Image (spheres, rainbow, N blue to C red):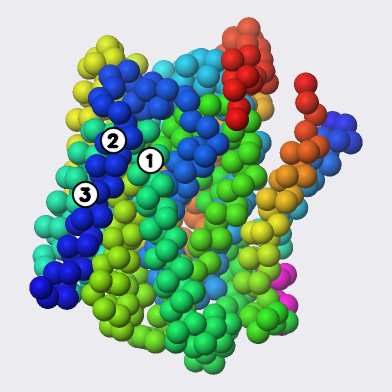
C-alpha cells in the first residue's frame, strides 16, 4: 500500500468507528424533539463539559490557530484570550438562561427572544440570521477536512470528492445520533485531538529545537517582533486585538448550538461548575500555536490559505504515513463532530422557530424530528456550496461568522437585566449592527484599527437602547414572571446535581 | 449592591481586564520569562488564573 493509502485508511476507519460509537450512545431513534435536540435536559457536569468542549475545539483549533501563528504571529494570541473571557461571561449568563429555558420549555436560542420579548417575528429574525452566520462556520470545518484529506492522501486523491463523502457521513451521523450521541463521540474526538496537538506542539518542537522555549528563540531570531503586537490602530494592532477578544467572547455563547449545549445541562449548578473549569481546557490551544511556530521554523514561505496547512505539511514531510494518518484522523474528527453539532443547531432552529412557530407546519413530534433531519441535509448542502465557491483562511471564516453572531448578545443580556428592552429595540439593534458590518465590507472601512464586528456591536447596543425607550415593552406581569423564573432554581433541578 | 456581591463581580472582572484592556500595556513590556517574551507568558498565566478567580467569585455567591 502507498503512503497516502495507509494514511487515508486510518482516517476512514477512525471516522467509521466514531460514527458507530455515536449511534450506539444515542440508544436508538428518539422521536421527541426535547430528547433529540436537548438530550432530555439531563446532562451532568461531565457530559456538558464534553459537549461544550466538543463544539469549541474544532478544526479551527487544529489548523486555523496554527495557521495564524505561522502566518501572522502575535495576533494569533487572541485565540488564547477570548475563551477565558467567554467563560467568565458564561458564569453569570448561562445559569439564568438555563432557568428561564427550563421554566418556559425553550428548545432553541431564538426561543429565548420570542418568549422574553413576546414576539414571534423577533424569534424568526434571530433564527434566520443565526443560521446565515452558522454556514461560514460549517464551511470552516469543510475547509479543514479538505486540507487534511489532501495532505493525508499526498495529493493522489481528489479532496473535493472526499469532502463530499465526509459530509454525507456527518449528516447521517446527526440523523441517527442526536445530541447525546454527539456528546459520546466528543469523548473520543477530544482524546484524539489532545494527543495529536501534543505531538505537533510539544514533541515536534522538542525534537526539532530541543525545547519549546528554544524553538521560540529560533522563530524570534528569524522573525524579530513576531510575538509582539503592532501598537494602537495599525492593522491587527493592539486596538484590533482587544476589540476582537471582547467581540468574540460576546459571540461565544449566542450560537444556536451553544444555546442547545447550555439548555441540555441538568441544572444551573452544572453550568457554573463548567464555567470555572473550562478555562483549563483552553490550555489545549497553546500546543496548537506552538505547532504553527514550529512549522514556521522548519518550513517557511507558505502564504495566505497555505499557512493553514503548515504543521500538517511538516508532519507529512518528516514522519511515516501512519503518524500522518493518526494526526489527520484526529483533525478530521475535530471537523466532523463540531460540524454535526452546528448542523443540528441550525436545523433545529429552522424547524422550531420558522417552520413550527411561524409557518405552523411540522408541529407534531414525529414531523418535527423528520423535518430537523431533512434540514440537516439541506444546511450541509448549503455549506458545501459555500465551500466550493469561497476559499479563504480558516481564521477569516471564523471572524466573519463571529462578527454576525455576536450581534445577538445585547438582546440576550438586556433580556435578562433590563426590563425596558423591547422587541423593536432588539430587532433594530441587530439589523443596524448587520448594516454596519455590510457597510464595512463594501467600503473596506478601517474604523481606527478596531474590529468591524465590535463597532457594529456598539452601534447595535446604542440603537437597541434608543429604540427600546420609545417603544412599548411586553406586559409588566409577563416581565415579572420572566424575571422571577430567571432568579429561581426549579425544585427538581436542585435535588440532583452530582 | 452589597460588599459581597461587589467583591464577586470584581473577582470575575480581573481576568477579563487582564486578557483584554491590559494587553496593550503588557505588549510594551520588554521582559523575557523563561526565555519567552512577556506577552505570551502573561496570557498563559491568566488562562491558568481565570479558574481561580471564578472559583473565588463562586465562593462569594450569596446562597438564597
Q: CA distance from mark 3 to mark 1?
A: 14 Å
Q: CA distance from mark 2 to mark 3?
A: 12 Å
Looking at the picture, tell me which residue is in the foreground, A84 or A400: A84
Same chain, labels 3 and 1: yes
Residue A24, numbered label: 2
Give the quadrant of the N terminus of chain A. bottom left
Classify residue A229 as left or right of residue A403.
Answer: right
> Under tag 3, what secondary structure?
helix
| Magenta highlight range | B24-30
Looking at the picture, tell me which residue is in the foreground, A247 or A4: A4
* Relative image position of residue A279 (x, y in whole percent): 60, 52
Looking at the picture, tell me which residue is in the foreground, A273 or A22: A22
* Vertical comparison of A292 with A192: above or below: below
Same chain, labels 1 and 2: yes
Give the quadrant of the C terminus of chain A. top right
Among numbered discs 3 and 1, the one appearing first in the sequence: 3
Q: According to the image, label 1 marks what residue?
A: A184
Which chain does the numbered disc 3 sit on? A
* Vertical comparison of A478 with A58: above or below: above
Q: Are marks 2 and 3 in contact (CB under 8 Å)?
A: no
Would you identify the image quadrant in which residue A24 lies? top left
Q: According to the image, label 3 marks what residue?
A: A16
Is B26 a magenta residue?
A: yes
Which chain does the numbered disc 1 sit on? A
Q: Measuring 49% from the left and 55% from the top, which residue is drawn there?
A: A452
Among numbered discs 1 and 2, the one appearing first in the sequence: 2
* Relative image position of residue A144 (x, y in whole percent): 30, 60
Looking at the picture, tell me which residue is in the foreground, A436 or A106: A106
Amino acid at each position: 500500500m502507498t503512503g497516502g493509502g495507509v494514511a487515508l485508511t486510518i482516517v476512514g476507519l477512525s471516522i467509521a468507528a466514531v460514527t458507530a460509537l455515536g449511534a450506539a450512545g444515542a440508544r436508538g431513534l428518539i422521536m421527541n424533539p426535547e430528547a433529540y435536540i436537548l438530550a432530555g435536559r439531563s446532562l451532568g457536569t461531565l457530559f456538558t463539559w464534553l459537549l461544550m468542549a466538543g463544539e469549541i475545539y474544532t478544526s479551527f483549533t487544529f489548523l486555523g490557530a496554527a495557521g495564524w501563528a505561522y502566518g501572522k504571529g502575535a495576533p494569533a494570541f487572541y485565540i488564547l484570550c477570548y475563551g477565558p473571557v467567554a467563560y467568565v461571561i458564561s458564569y453569570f449568563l448561562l445559569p439564568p438562561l438555563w432557568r428561564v429555558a427550563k421554566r418556559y420549555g425553550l428548545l432553541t436560542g431564538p426561543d429565548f427572544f420570542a418568549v422574553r420579548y413576546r414576539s414571534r417575528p423577533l424569534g424568526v429574525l434571530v433564527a434566520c440570521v443565526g443560521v446565515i452566520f452558522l454556514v461560514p462556520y460549517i464551511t470552516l470545518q469543510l475547509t479543514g477536512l479538505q486540507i487534511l484529506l489532501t495532505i493525508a492522501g499526498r495529493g493522489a486523491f481528489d479532496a473535493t470528492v472526499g469532502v463530499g463523502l465526509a459530509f454525507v457521513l456527518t449528516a447521517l451521523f446527526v440523523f441517527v445520533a442526536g445530541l447525546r450521541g454527539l456528546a459520546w463521540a466528543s469523548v473520543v474526538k477530544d482524546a484524539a485531538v489532545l494527543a495529536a496537538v501534543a505531538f505537533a506542539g510539544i514533541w515536534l518542537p522538542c525534537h526539532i529545537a530541543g525545547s519549546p522555549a528554544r524553538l521560540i528563540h529560533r522563530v524570534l531570531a528569524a522573525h524579530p517582533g513576531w510575538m509582539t503586537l503592532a501598537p494602537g490602530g495599525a492593522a491587527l494592532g493592539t486596538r484590533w486585538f482587544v476589540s476582537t477578544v471582547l467581540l468574540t467572547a460576546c459571540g461565544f455563547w449566542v450560537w444556536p448550538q451553544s444555546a442547545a449545549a447550555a439548555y441540555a445541562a441538568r441544572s444551573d449548578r452544572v453550568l457554573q461548575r463548567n464555567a470555572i473549569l473550562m478555562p483549563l481546557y483552553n490550555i489545549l490551544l497553546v500546543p496548537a500555536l506552538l505547532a504553527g511556530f514550529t512549522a514556521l521554523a522548519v518550513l517557511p514561505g507558505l502564504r495566505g490559505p497555505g499557512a493553514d496547512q503548515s504543521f500538517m505539511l511538516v508532519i507529512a514531510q518528516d514522519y511515516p504515513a501512519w503518524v500522518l494518518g493518526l494526526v489527520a484522523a484526529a483533525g478530521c474528527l475535530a471537523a466532523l463532530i463540531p460540524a454535526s453539532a452546528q448542523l443540528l443547531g441550525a436545523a433545529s432552529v429552522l424547524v422550531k422557530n420558522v417552520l413550527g412557530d411561524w409557518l405552523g407546519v411540522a408541529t407534531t413530534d414525529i414531523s418535527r424530528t423528520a423535518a430537523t433531519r431533512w434540514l440537516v441535509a439541506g444546511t450541509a448542502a448549503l455549506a458545501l456550496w459555500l465551500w466550493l465557491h469561497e476559499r479563504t483562511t480558516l481564521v477569516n471564516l471564523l471572524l466573519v461568522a463571529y462578527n454576525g453572531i455576536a450581534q445577538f448578545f445585547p438582546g440576550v443580556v438586556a433580556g435578562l437585566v433590563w426590563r425596558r428592552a423591547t422587541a423593536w429595540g432588539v430587532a433594530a439593534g441587530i439589523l443596524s449592527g448587520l448594516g454596519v458590518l455590510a457597510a464595512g465590507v463594501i467600503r473596506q472601512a478601517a474604523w481606527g484599527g478596531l474590529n468591524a464586528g465590535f463597532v457594529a456591536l456598539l452601534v447595535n447596543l446604542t440603537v437597541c437602547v434608543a429604540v427600546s425607550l420609545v417603544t412599548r415593552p411586553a406586559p409588566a406581569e409577563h416581565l415579572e414572571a420572566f424575571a422571577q423564573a430567571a432568579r429561581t432554581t426549579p425544585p427538581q433541578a436542585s435535588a440532583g446535581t452530582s | 449592591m452589597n460588599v459581597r456581591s461587589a467583591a464577586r463581580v470584581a473577582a470575575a472582572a480581573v481576568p477579563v481586564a487582564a486578557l483584554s484592556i491590559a494587553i496593550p500595556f503588557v505588549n510594551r513590556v520588554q521582559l523575557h520569562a523563561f526565555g519567552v517574551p512577556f506577552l505570551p507568558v502573561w496570557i498563559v498565566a491568566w488562562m491558568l488564573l481565570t479558574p481561580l478567580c471564578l472559583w473565588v467569585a463562586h465562593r462569594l455567591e450569596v446562597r438564597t
